[in-house]
Image: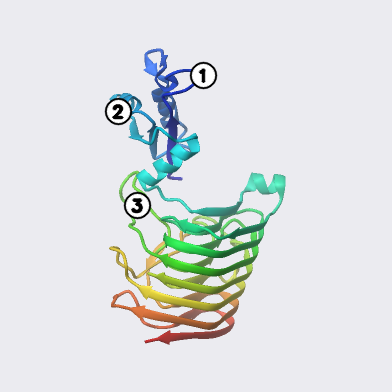
């Protein structure tokens, strides 16, 4: 896994003044911490280690030892606040809100369930709400409502990858916009954002190198979505992992190219399908059993060679009913 480790460092420690610069066998404490992180086993090693400091002295000392460091506001009340500013300064990829079911936690605590998110303004270079991808247990009864989506790479993403179950997800009354950010996988340590500006993304497909069903996604609904996006509403399962009972109503999309990145790509990370060229309709669905779209519209604004101008493209779907009108 490629990730960034941030180390908060505050010069004005009350219990141990100037603690980050304390000498330990000739090396400042904050430098030793960063070095130990960089020396972690390969499986856990970070692609990037950055010290988030509150004082220029810490930044300079780190740089003298070849450690990346940035200066943050000295008035932060907590290390968490300092890390939040560092994430913004470094433009690190992350989802705004995540609901997962990891192996150890699901075995210990059971299902991730009964989650309600409402009245938020969500900004991220990844998903505003991400459900998955770690789905070893059960995720159920999650509601996102009355939120503003502020330039996220996806509004809502729902994944199964690890054999678990995601069910009874309800998303309603969203406004805002999604956009595609740059892909920089070829550059070591550079951010690589998932998503191509989809307003809706539902995915059930195995991880790369894995076999067998990805898991179950069922009873997912979206209604009253008013979004400007750079890609389509996307729902894709596999023959042995069909998405079951997907309902969309009052979805009003404006497809408009707003950023600097070219379109024409589908993004199914993390999976063997990965990223691949594909023309962009308003709605794409694969291996969905029970797809209902009603009282919905799409408008294509401007010109983009990636858009095929079609309302919907369906592959291997059953019991599909579509009321999606193309506006001119």
Q: Secondary structure at mark 3?
A: loop
- The disc placed on residue 185 is 3
Relative horizontal placement of residue 207, taking residue 52 as reference (left or right): right
Which mark is first along the chain, 3 or 2? Answer: 2
Q: Earlier in the sequence, mark 3 or mark 1?
A: 1
Disc 3 to disc 1, how far (Cα)? Answer: 43 Å
Whether residue 278 appears in this view of the structure is yes
What residue is drawn where x is 33% and y is 68%? Answer: 263
Residue 158 at x, y = what percent?
55, 62
Lateral position of residue 18 relative to residue 104, left or right: left
Q: Quadrant of residue 75?
A: top left
Residue beneath disc 2:
63
170 in relation to 181, above or below: below
Indicate which disc residue 15 carries.
1
Question: What quarter of the picture does the C terminus occupy?
Answer: bottom left
Colouring scheme applied when the structure was drawn: rainbow
User: Label 2: how many residues lie within 10 Å, few (<14), some (14-19) or many (20+)?
Assistant: some
Q: Specify the farthest residue to the front.
A: 75
Query: Which of marks 1 and 2 precedes in the sequence?
Result: 1
| Number of marks present in the image shown | 3
Q: CA distance from mark 2 to mark 1?
A: 26 Å
């Amino acid at each position: 896994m490629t990730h960034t480790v941030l180390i908060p460092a505050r010069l004005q420690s009350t219990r141990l003044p100037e603690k980050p610069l304390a000498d330990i066998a000739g090396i400042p404490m904050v430098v030793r911490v960063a070095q130990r992180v960089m020396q972690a086993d390969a499986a856990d090693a970070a692609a990037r280690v950055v010290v988030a400091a509150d004082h220029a002295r810490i930044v300079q000392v780190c740089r003298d030892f070849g450690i990346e460091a940035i200066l943050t506001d000295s008035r932060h009340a907590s290390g968490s606040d300092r890390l939040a500013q560092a994430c913004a300064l470094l433009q690190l990829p992350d989802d705004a809100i995540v609901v997962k079911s990891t192996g150890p936690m699901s075995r210990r605590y059971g299902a991730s369930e009964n989650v309600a998110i409402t009245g938020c303004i969500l900004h991220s270079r990844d998903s505003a709400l991400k459900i998955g991808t770690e789905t070893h247990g059960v995720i159920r009864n999650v509601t996102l409502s009355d939120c503003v989506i502020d330039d996220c790479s996806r509004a809502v993403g729902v994944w199964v990858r690890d054999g678990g179950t995601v069910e009874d997800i309800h998303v309603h009354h969203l406004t805002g916009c999604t956009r595609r950010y740059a892909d920089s996988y070829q550059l070591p340590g550079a951010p690589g954002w998932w998503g191509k500006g989809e307003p809706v993304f539902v995915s059930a497909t195995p991880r790369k190198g894995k076999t067998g069903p990805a898991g179950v996604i069922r009873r997912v609904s979206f209604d009253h979505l008013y979004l400007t996006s750079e890609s389509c509403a996307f729902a894709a399962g596999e023959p042995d992992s069909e998405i079951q009972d997907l309902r969309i109503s009052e979805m009003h999309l404006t497809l408009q190219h707003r950023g600097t990145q070219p379109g024409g790509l589908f993004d199914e990370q993390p999976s063997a399908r990965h990223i691949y060229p594909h023309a962009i309709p308003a709605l794409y669905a694969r291996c969905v059993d029970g797809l209902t779209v009603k009282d919905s519209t799409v408008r294509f604004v401007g010109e983009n060679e990636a858009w095929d101008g079609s309302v919907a493209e369906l592959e291997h779907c059953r019991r599909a009913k579509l009321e999606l009108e193309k506006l001119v």
